Image: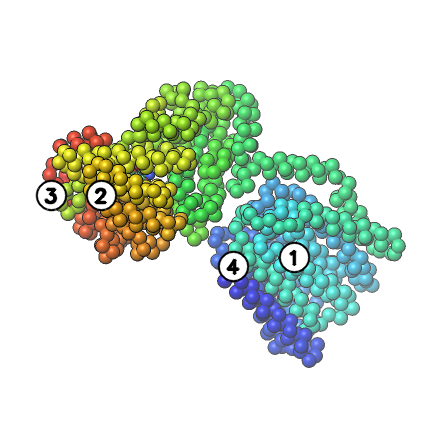
Amino acid sequence: MVWFLVSLLLVVSAAYAAAVVLKPSEEFDPLVDGALGLVAMWVPAAVSWFTVCRAESRRPDILLSACAVSCWAAGTTYYVLYAAAGEDVPLPSPADFGYSGFYLLMLAALAFIVRDRLRAMTWSVILDSVIGALGAAAVLCVVLDPLLNSTMGGPWTPTALLGTGYPLMDLLLVATVIGITASTGFSFGEGWVLVVLGLLLFTGADVTYALLELNHDYVLGTPLDASWAVGLALVAAWIALQARTPGRHSRRRVAVPAQTVPTLATVAGLGVLILASQERVLVLAVVLASLTLTLAILPLVFRQRLRLSQATTQARTDELTGLPNRRALYADVPERLAAARRRRSAVLLLDLDKFKEINDGLGHDVGDRLLVQVAARLSGQLRPTDLLARMGGDEFVIHLDNCGQEQAQAVALKLRAALVEPCDLGDITVHVSASIGISCYPEQGQDLTLLLRKADMAMYSAKSTRSGHAVYADGAADLIPHQFHTVQALNEALLEDQLILHFQPKIDLATGAVRAVEALVRWDHPALGLLQPEAFLARFEEAGLMPALTNVVLGRALDQAAVWAKEGQPLSVAVNLSACSVMDARLPAQVAEMVSDRGLTPSVLVLEITEDVLVGDRSRASTTLSALRGTGVRIAVDDFGKGYSSLSYLRDLPIDELKLDKSFILTMMDDTRATALVVSTIDLAHSLGLQMTAEGVENLDTYRSLSDYGCDFAQGFLVSKPLTAPELDAWFQTRGPLPSAADYVPTASQAE
Ligand code: C2E
Ligand code: CA
Ligand code: CA
């Protein structure tokens, strides 16, 4: 689409230019210079506005640039209509409002780009731009010497002012664009060369116009007019390309040396001074040239210092979010603690839940945009005296000055509430939540390292209990998170039977019978107590120990299935497979062996995979799954509907069951769209010959509705929470017969 727009711009402006050059006389031609000329002005304006509407998020830089292009088009329209009537357009005229508007709005657009993307570099860019503009002004004074010295009254006439003002503004914009590009070496939108070329064309045309106008020689309808049209088309093409460039940072680098603008300006200034020593030039030119050199060369020390302070600011700033980074945190918090003496304060460690899934499933670009939004929302909740820093990844740290434990908890609540609204990332909406750990100064630590360590432990506790936030509890004082994270601790968990399984029953909605359970792993941690999978699965994954964990879980689940079979109450068990386990080519043989070793039939085992497994190496996943299915094991797609993959795998892969994600079930009673999705997913499953399980059934209304819609199985707290094997046996004893949903009454313990 973008390239279509760019081609359109170039074709229209080229057609106009060709028509102007080829027309027989230089007289004003209503068709070429009037109609076609105006089309060549308004097509760039239209393309710019189209870009504004298409841009993923509100981008003030694009909006202002579109206004600028429209201003120019409006100015020209006035000029052409006035001239078409056979009148001589005065200088200045209302058209000049349009032209001046173009320059001011373009400058404003560039200012937004500098502010949003360069932050720490702002002063350097401004200084470089000013030097560039001064150098350009010195040269212009020489080129436009006749105009400024004209018999019409010297440099202060409107002709002289506008005649030099326009080219000067052109060059100021060029200097700024090059300054921005050079200062950071970042890509100033893909088309920064286009905008520079366009503005240089403007400069040439403006200078020629000013010199012609000196003797009132300018007439409408010469190739000069085409230069503005082509220039405007190039600017609009840049705007169209801008919308594709991510708003904040791009990893693409452009090789423009940082000193380009000051160096060019210095050479220009020197040139003017050398010329002045040989020929008569305007005093103004000499003054401007001297100023350029002074600013560019003399305060080298000052510039050096400025660069240094910018470098420091940059080193302290997180490039993505613009927040202070880890380095800044470690530098500032100790100072803040010392300055506050014994005043209480709190450190909050905030970690996004399931960020990895979003990042892996939707791409790093989406993950980055999400982090930017999260950062903005969090900072919106804080006082100016609080410090918010990004530690890295999806971890943020907040230091709340002058704040006790209760207040810190209130802030944690506020921060979590700020993340409740889904994040609109342009083409996709994402839900996030966070877990926050709190530690308090001075009771729980005198220095940042200790406070952070304790906040980290509290955060894990918040994650594992899903409480959202937690204050560090002194009981866990001797546990250092470092130990908790070590590969050794994970290995011990595997070898010393610290991993245990809870089983959650799946009820048959038609009969009320329970013939299946899902095995869910827990870590009975020697120091932290019972940990939920969210608190540790990612660590196992990082340590490459996931296949080992899967092995342990499979072994224990099948052991338990064998016990139940022996007791005359056969239950099938579902085991969750992580992505890397599915990729493991040895898995089918292992599973077959484990099942037969225990004398079980393979259909007793269900393996649950999630959709994101299929996003990666589909063919490899498909090979393993087919081999697994070949052994007689059943395959279920877990968290169905939550993933972001296309549904084509349903056609290609061997699957027996879909487990609709609990987010749909939890909301289906209040949200008609969720209900519609549930109903149609049940139909989809059945028409593909698959069985359908609803997860997260928490109340009787949902249970009854699912039964009405023809769903096959339900799993959720209404039926039972995940229980240990002995608890599950007891549950079977106490639960009454459940012939159908209508008769189902939860027992007190299940309803809790
Ligand atoms: P999952 O496979 O979607 O498991 C269902 C989760 O939903 C369980 O959380 C269960 O406790 C919870 N749940 C059950 N009924 C309800 C309900 O009515 N309402 C709500 N709100 N939640 C309900 P759990 O046990 O914490 O497991 C979390 C996730 O950890 C699992 O999600 C699964 O993805 C992963 N996991 C658990 N065990 C294993 C394992 O052995 N291996 C692997 N690779 N992943 C596992
Ligand atoms: Ca599962
Ligand atoms: Ca699930």
> Closer to the observer: label 2 or label 1?
2
Residue that appears at 56% across and 28% down:
331
- Element type at marker 3? loop
> Closer to the observer: label 2 or label 4?
2
Q: Is mark 1 within 8 Å of ligand 1?
A: no
User: Which residue, given by chain and number where applicable, does mark 3 sit on?
Assistant: 739
Please state which amino acid type lies under the numbered disc 1.
Answer: Val
User: Which residue, given by chain and number where applicable, does mark 2 sit on?
Assistant: 602
Q: Residues under labels 2 and 4: Cα distance?
A: 58 Å
Please state which amino acid type lies under the numbered disc 3.
Answer: Pro
Quick one: which residue is furthest to the bottom in this view?
A: 24
How many numbered marks, from 0 up?
4
Lower sequence index among marks 1 and 3 = 1
Lower sequence index among marks 2 and 3 = 2
Q: Is mark 4 within 8 Å of ligand 3?
A: no
Instruction: Residue 581: tell me if it is visible.
Output: yes
Residue that appears at 35% across and 25% down:
528
User: Which residue, given by chain and number where applicable, does mark 1 sit on?
Assistant: 196
> Closer to the observer: label 2 or label 3?
2
Q: Of 403 and 639, which appears nearest the observer?
A: 639
User: Which residue, given by chain and number where applicable, does mark 4 sit on?
Assistant: 51
| Whole-percent x, y for residue 221 in the image | 68, 73
Mark number for residue 3?
none
Q: Residues under labels 2 and 1: Cα distance?
A: 69 Å
Please state which amino acid type lies under the numbered disc 2.
Answer: Pro
Left or right relative to 43: residue 231? right
In the rendered image, the vertical position of residue 192 relative to residue 294, given as above or below: below
Lower sequence index among marks 2 and 1 = 1
Q: Residues under labels 4 and 3: Cα distance?
A: 61 Å
Q: Residues under labels 1 and 3: Cα distance?
A: 77 Å
